[in-house]
Amino acid sequence: MPAPPRNGERRTKKGFNPKARTDRAQQAGQDQDDSDDEVMMAAAQKANFEAAEGKAKAAVHKATGNTFFASSNWAGAVQSFSEAIQCDPTDHVFFSNRSASYLNLGKTNEAVADAKECVKLSPAWAKGYSRLGAALWKEGKLADAKQAYSEGLKLEPTNAVIKQGLREVIEAMVSGGDKSSEPATAAPESKDVVPPSADVETTPAPVEDGPPVLGIDLGTTYSCVAVFMDGEVQVLADDEGRRTVPSYVAFNSGTGERLIGERAKAQASKNIDNTFFDVKRILGQKMSDEAVQKEAKRLPFKIIAGDNGQPLIQAEVNGKPRKLAPEEISAAVLGEMKRIAEARLGRTDLTKAVITVPAYFNDAQRKATQAAGAIAGLEVLRVINEPTAAALAYGLDEKGQAAQKGKGSNILIFDLGGGTFDVTVLRIEEGIFEVKATGGDTRLGGEDFDATVATHIIAELKKVHKLDVSGDAQKKSRVKAAVEKAKRALSSNEVTKVEIALDGEEYAIDLTRAKFEALNAEFFDRTLATVKKVLNDSKLKPTEIDEVVLVGGSTRIPKIQSMLREYMQVETLCKSVNPDEAVAYGAAVQGAILSGCRHPACSALLLVDVTPLSLGIETQGSNMSIIIPRNSQIPCTRSSIFTTTEDYQTGLEVKVFEGERPCTNSNHLLGDFHVSGIERAKREVPQIQVMFALDANGVLNVTASDLTTKVTASCQIGGACKGLSKEEIEKMLSEAAQYAAEDELFRRKLELKNQLEHIAYASSEADRDEILVWLEGRGMADMTVEQLEAKLKVLGYEPRTV
């Protein structure tokens, strides 16, 4: 186990003597020459570390610059490449990229200077001469541009870009004369002389053609899907015209049919043990977690522990017991979103998606979401935070576009949904969405409000009507559904009635808005506490927020709105984006950006997100030594120096955690690896540099290097959480495909059965009775498509197809 860095190193920790190394030398009787050698060695080690750190930081700035360049934000690209050069002024590519950015800004002098520096640093790099040729041409020095292209062609005779540049500059010289003595802008030419576009050192632009990427808001209680097509975002409705679909999955024990969405929710009270919802609250977690234990007690269906300690849902499928992972339930909902999109758009090739998660989801929960997408047959391009997606929706809204003009705006996204709560503060300016801070609660939402009110109503039923339903899961489910309906009514009324049908009797209990607010006061206060914390993290005051944007169905609650207005000191809250659809809308925009869409509505947008939880390693005493603090912008690279805890230690274990607790036992283990071959020396002498590099997809690369022996070990934490294995995902994917086939078979049988019933009721009484008796004698599970089609043909009808 590594020890924290010694005082005086790059990361200072209290409790270490800054003169420890000198004291040990004096105690050993070493002479001054040995001390000088040690100091020189330490200085060299420090220099090596600083150089390595500089290169790592420069790479992050370069990646940001490439993103700016791809979105035609030339000023942002210049700034990022300049920061890269400050970190590492020896890399010729940074000067090349900045030269191209300056060229697009029309700053030819700077472009030429950077291109010359690029050639100076790497005279054998052909592209540097190509860059210089383009800059000189733009400056009007055609002869010099020709010379630069010629030098590049000597290095790479087959380089098509350099060949084209040389050919076109010669054509320009022939048609317009040699204007090398003056800039092209001053030349009275009949046509502009424009150099070929300079390509920045980055990955090739994605192909623009192809099917749209699905933007999916996988909600705790409701889900939504959208796509960016024909220059706009389309939120897609299901077969009944609903644009949000309940995140419910059920299995009909009688027919074996799998139900998803509204159909599953509608029969929940009658099929309480086999209808599954709110699984997002146990996704990517352990059965032993206190929060999962609470959910297991609250939810009406059975949740048990799997072999690896993960929660599993006990279901009955086709009359047989079946254990389902939460990922499988979520995959069914995602599969339904995919089906809705394909049906609405008339396509069968929608296989890529951006899926949203609460900002405060940890690594395991995010990876579980990705696994659910894979099981649903989707390639998950990115998992993004829900409030960040909502911010993209706001940014494309007319009000949001107006807010970006001039000085830009500070925006607070207040996202209160059915099961989770997030707050994010962003800076939006000129198409750049820069997240400043984020926070939230993955167990706070409308479901909790409903639960407190349902408990109150159950108590009232017992007190007033002498009816005890507390031990009846089916009746409690009906109370919950009635409470949810009453809650919605209270958003526009001061008083309503909770109406419930139980045992053939109708019960109506008055519920006032004041009572609803009193029952949920603790939850409401928690939302405001999170707002205060996120504002503090962003170093902004309430009066410095230009707009408060409401997202999520629970933001319709009047008390929530009044509390926000009062604390934020604003008269109105932004309601210009649809709170139920904004997250899916933003996810679709991000999907379009990732797919390479060059439409003006999204091509100029740049999203700079943050990591919601701190990342670090375990040091002596199970201490959490943070390397990347929470709310650090991603992509990012951070490093720290650690040392050994024992004399002559030659190896150490590096354990990587995420979380905010000072003790690693309370945080989430992401992964671990071993470093061997470190310097054999007294404790606290070796220097081990641990570097974290977190990319835009949340993939964390951890490297540990001994600065003396140069040995290095590393691991990539992209799926390091102890979630589903590749084999488990493939098995579930196969089962999901089987369910899809079974669902399609059931729909076909139902379609044929409906056709037979329609024929029966249009026939004579004798024929009607014969057909209906035939149907009643065969259950849906036992009937085959072939039998139904044969029956139709016997009656003289062709089976109808849709």
Image (cartoon, rainbow, N blue to C red):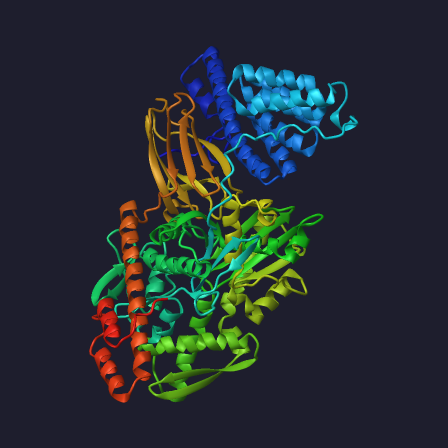
Left or right: 656, with 152 as reference point: left
Position of the C terminus, as image quadrant, is: bottom left
**Residue nearer the viewer, 455 or 742:** 742
Give x and y (percent) for residue 279: 37, 61
Note whether 66 is above or below 662 in the view shown.
above
Give x and y (percent) for residue 403: 67, 53
Quadrant of residue 617 in the image?
Answer: top left
**Residue nearer the viewer, 559 or 416:** 416
Note whether 670 is above or below 288 in the view shown.
above
**Residue nearer the viewer, 610 or 673:** 610
Residue 439 in view of the camera: no
Quadrant of residue 758 in the image?
Answer: bottom left
**Residue nearer the viewer, 420 or 726:** 726
In this view, which residue lies farthest toward the front? 796
Note whether 786 is above or below 640 in the view shown.
below
Q: How many marks?
A: 0
Position of the N terminus, as image quadrant, is: top left
Residue 680 in view of the camera: yes
Give x and y (percent) for residue 775: 24, 78
Give x and y (percent) for residue 480: 41, 75
